[in-house]
Image (tube, rainbow, N blue to C red):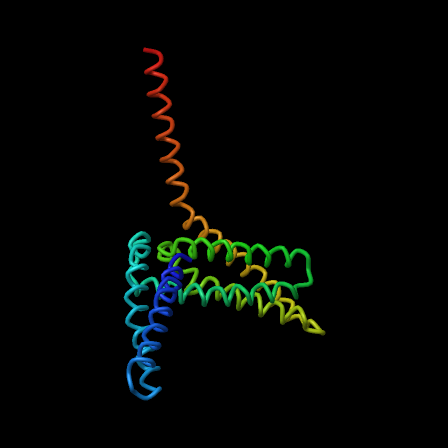
């Protein structure tokens, strides 16, 4: 993500300056080596942090998030990514073709929502429910379902639980689809506006040529 570029830029500037400061301290100042190292570390911090903050400020302004909100969204993204990976590992163990397709769709929808928010972090607040509960519910159900399917002797109760879990997975999938639609609504609206502008421009061009 573009935010990470600010960190790279900060380190690219801070490392050479810190090295130069350390070299000057070693060859010009008659002090212990530990102080040379401390001077180098202090110089790195003095250069890195202001550079990183200044270079990242433009990006944060573009996406309309404060630094605190951005860090919170990144934390939620990392948490969701771990859960999506666990969904992937779980659905590999699904034996039924029908169930495999269902779980695979849940995985693909979850990945689509994750990447949409990763590309535009401000969209997190459109689908907060996905990060707070929906993806976790999907993971818990899928892991529970795979455990039940591996049961060597399926009693009547286990079979009923499997049926109920399939029904609940359908409900979870519909919830995820609704999340995906919400997150894409903005793109659809922007596309409609763009198409309308193009139609107006085309109409103006035709009227001008017909005059």
Q: Position of residue 60 (x, y in %)?
A: 31, 57
Between 90 and 111, the one nearer to me in the picture = 111
- Residue at the limit of the structure toward the front, as seen here: 28
Q: Residue at x 58, y 70 (%)?
A: 144
Q: Residue at x 58, y 69 (%)?
A: 143
Q: Specify whether 87 is left or right of 115.
A: right
Q: Position of residue 85 (x, y in %)?
A: 55, 65
Q: From the viewer's perspective, is residue 19 above or below residue 26?
A: above
Q: Residue at x 32, y 63 (%)?
A: 69
Q: Residue at x 37, y 34 (%)?
A: 194
Quadrant location of the N terminus in the rendered image: bottom left
Q: From the viewer's perspective, is residue 28 above or below residue 173?
A: below
- Residue at the limit of the structure toward the right, as seen here: 152
Q: Total number of numbered labels?
A: 0
Q: Specify whether 39 is left or right of 77.
A: left
Quadrant location of the C terminus in the rendered image: top left
- Quarter occupied by residue 155: bottom right
Between 94 and 34, the one nearer to me in the picture = 34
Q: Specify whether 166 is left or right of 188.
A: right
- Residue at the limit of the structure toward the top, as seen here: 211
- Quarter occupied by residue 190: top left
Between 179 and 50, the one nearer to me in the picture = 50
């Amino acid at each position: 993500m573009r935010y990470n570029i600010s960190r790279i830029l900060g380190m690219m500037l801070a490392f050479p300056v810190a090295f130069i400061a350390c070299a000057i301290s070693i060859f010009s100042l008659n002090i212990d080596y530990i102080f040379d190292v401390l001077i180098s570390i202090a110089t790195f911090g003095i250069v890195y942090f202001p550079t990183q903050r200044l270079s990242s400020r433009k990006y944060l302004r573009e996406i309309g998030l404060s630094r605190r909100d951005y860090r919170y969204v990144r934390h939620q993204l990392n948490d969701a990514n771990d859960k999506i990976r666990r969904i992937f590992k779980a659905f590999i163990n699904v034996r039924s073709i029908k169930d495999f397709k269902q779980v695979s769709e849940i995985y693909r929808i979850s990945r689509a929502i994750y990447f949409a928010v990763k590309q535009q972090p401000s969209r997190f607040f459109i689908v907060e429910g996905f990060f707070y509960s929906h993806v976790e519910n999907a993971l818990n159900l899928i892991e529970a379902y795979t455990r039940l399917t591996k049961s060597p002797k399926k009693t009547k109760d286990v079979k009923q639980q499997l049926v109920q879990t399939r029904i609940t997975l359908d409900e979870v999938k519909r919830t995820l689809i609704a999340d995906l639609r919400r997150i894409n609504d903005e793109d659809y609206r922007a596309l409609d506006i763009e198409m309308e502008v193009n139609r107006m421009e085309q109409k103006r061009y035709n009227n001008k040529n017909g005059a």
